[in-house]
Image: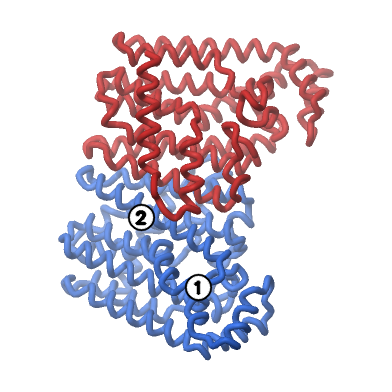
Chain colours: A red, B blue
Amino acid sequence: MQKRISQYRDALNERTAAIFRDRKPNSLYDPVRYVASSGGKQLRPVLFLACCEAVGGDFRSLLDVAVALECVHNFTLVHDDIMDEDDLRRGRQTVHKKWNENTAILTGDALLVKAFELLSSVDEKKMPYMIGEFSSGILEICEGQVLDKDFEKREGVSVQEYYDMIAKKTGRLFSLSCQLGAYLGDGSAEQIKALEQYGNRIGFAFQIQDDILDLISRDDVLGKKIGSDLRGGKKTFLVSYARDHLHAEALQVFNDILALKSPAQSDFARFIQLCKKSGTFDAAEKEIQQALGAARRNLSLIKASVAKDILVALLEQIETRTF
Amino acid sequence: MQKRISQYRDALNERTAAIFRDRKPNSLYDPVRYVASSGGKQLRPVLFLACCEAVGGDFRSLLDVAVALECVHNFTLVHDDIMDEDDLRRGRQTVHKKWNENTAILTGDALLVKAFELLSSVDEKKMPYMIGEFSSGILEICEGQVLDKDFEKREGVSVQEYYDMIAKKTGRLFSLSCQLGAYLGDGSAEQIKALEQYGNRIGFAFQIQDDILDLISRDDVLGKKIGSDLRGGKKTFLVSYARDHLHAEALQVFNDILALKSPAQSDFARFIQLCKKSGTFDAAEKEIQQALGAARRNLSLIKASVAKDILVALLEQIETRTF
């Protein structure tokens, strides 16, 4: 199974390099190549390929769509990093930091457009569905990003509002990857639906994990500056849940920390303490477990295979991930 | 003929309004609607519809693709205005000025993605070609924008380099609009090619006009701040041509003006004078005339019709445009 994942990754890396090799002007494609070859987890294209194989499809013929999904993911990272003023990503400088903001805007634009170009290789009969789902999915991601930025300026964001936001911002690209993999692999309507839900739940668990890791990981492990959510005023699961479950006095302290422009190390410690006290980490853990359990049940329609093993193994990887 | 253009514009406005009506969140779709309803010239969708009709197609069934082309145009304007730090567009504040830069990045992203979503209505047989041309065309536009920004930092840009840049940055969306109109209207391969060239030449003439208007028009007529090219260090046709045709002493004065961070009114006057002296305006006029003449000849394969009349009339409009 690990061998098959390695096969996926090798094929993805090779195809990605070939797509962007020798493209000019370098002032656009150097940053594009920098991002595309930055060796992220490639979770979304791996999910796409595994879902395709899991329903009986041939992954080799669909590599371009897999690369397209990673291009979309990279597009969101490059533009989000500008908006969040993040300087570090995957252990390296972000594009707007290494080059400048204009270059980062155009790099994101080019990655997004390239993603669509890569779809034009698909069987024409499947194209209307694919283009429709792909584009409306990315539009949802943009909407989710807007909500995420809106929430930074709001004080109270309910857990439900948080869920709605991450379903768009994070969940949709995961669910889209799985859904399209199943669709292009000629899965049944039930399989496509089930794998879309599987992806949606992975995205949900992934984002709550992300919120926790941003607080308790280390820069060198995570590949980006930890604590940036708190500094940026992000309404993470932790913030939304804890505010609902802290009593008046503790809530005041919690809100005071949230209001700080530059929280110190001691503020982070106090923030973590209050999250613990309010049962927020336990609740987050429970939500993650439930989502991954439901995602696992979504795989019941899928016959045993190496690809299915990968889909199961990815659930465990997400549960125990440290970056 | 004017009646048919009005029909196009009414249909476009109605469809555009319907597409973006009631979409949430408002923090994304208010700026999107602001841009989409800003009443630009809608030259590209009008060209698309006229080319479609000119080869015998039915324009009413292809309104979504026409709106998609205007969405792409608006995407480029919103992102370019951030990069160029322009505050005024179509007589109104630019998005990054009226809202903020993050909102402008996301507004551009959403317009671009929406454009692709609008293409999913097209006949599946035509989709691979359309998605391929549409996406590779937009990629060229991004490459052109990168070159335009690169040139700002360079001293000498040849007229040929300028041509290559505007062919991508401006020409490609015009040629794409015409090419896709002819293709989706079931034109012959020769008609598609001829109308693509027609569009390319219109774009060429349009951009040189733009360079001139930026210098000699008025803010209230142009709907944006005049002189922004000179202030931004843009290597326009005027700059590239004049530098090649001024003698040593005058060239030094010219270069000194180009090097100014904030040119005064008198510098603009001197700049215009040097352009006149070097025959630059005459050369620009000649290039425009030649391009529009060639564009007119590209219409020889098109049978007489109201739509063809529109395509001819647009050539005259571009020649005499003031904004």
Label 2 sits on a secondary structure element that is: helix
Residue A26 on image: x %, y %? 47, 52
Q: Residues within 10 Å of mark 1 (few under 14, many from 20)?
A: many
Q: In this view, does A27 lie above or below A144?
A: below
* Circle 2 chain: B
Label 1 sits on a secondary structure element that is: loop
Identified at 47% across, 88% down, the residue is B279
Identified at 67% across, 81% down, the residue is B265
Residue A103 on image: x %, y %? 55, 51
* Circle 1 chain: B
Amino acid type for the residue under numbered disc 2: Gly
Q: Residue furthest front?
A: B248
Residue B314 on image: x %, y %? 34, 74
Q: Which of marks 2 and 1 is in front?
A: 1
Residue under label 1, please give it: B236
Q: In which quarter of the image is residue A164?
A: top right
Residue B224 visible within the image: no
Quadrant in which the N terminus of chain B appears: bottom left
Q: Quadrant of residue B95?
A: bottom right
Residue under label 2, please give it: B137
Same chain for marks 2 and 1? Answer: yes
Q: Is residue B280 above or below residue A137?
A: below
Q: How many marks?
A: 2
Q: How crowded is mark 2: few (under 14 residues within 10 Å), some or many (20 or more)?
A: many
Label 2 vs 1, first from the N-terminus: 2
Amino acid type for the residue under numbered disc 1: Thr
Q: In this view, does A14 lie above or below B168?
A: above
Identified at 54% across, 49% down, the residue is A105
Identified at 69% across, 79% down, the residue is B264
For the residues labelled 2 and 1, the Cα–Cα distance comes to 22 Å
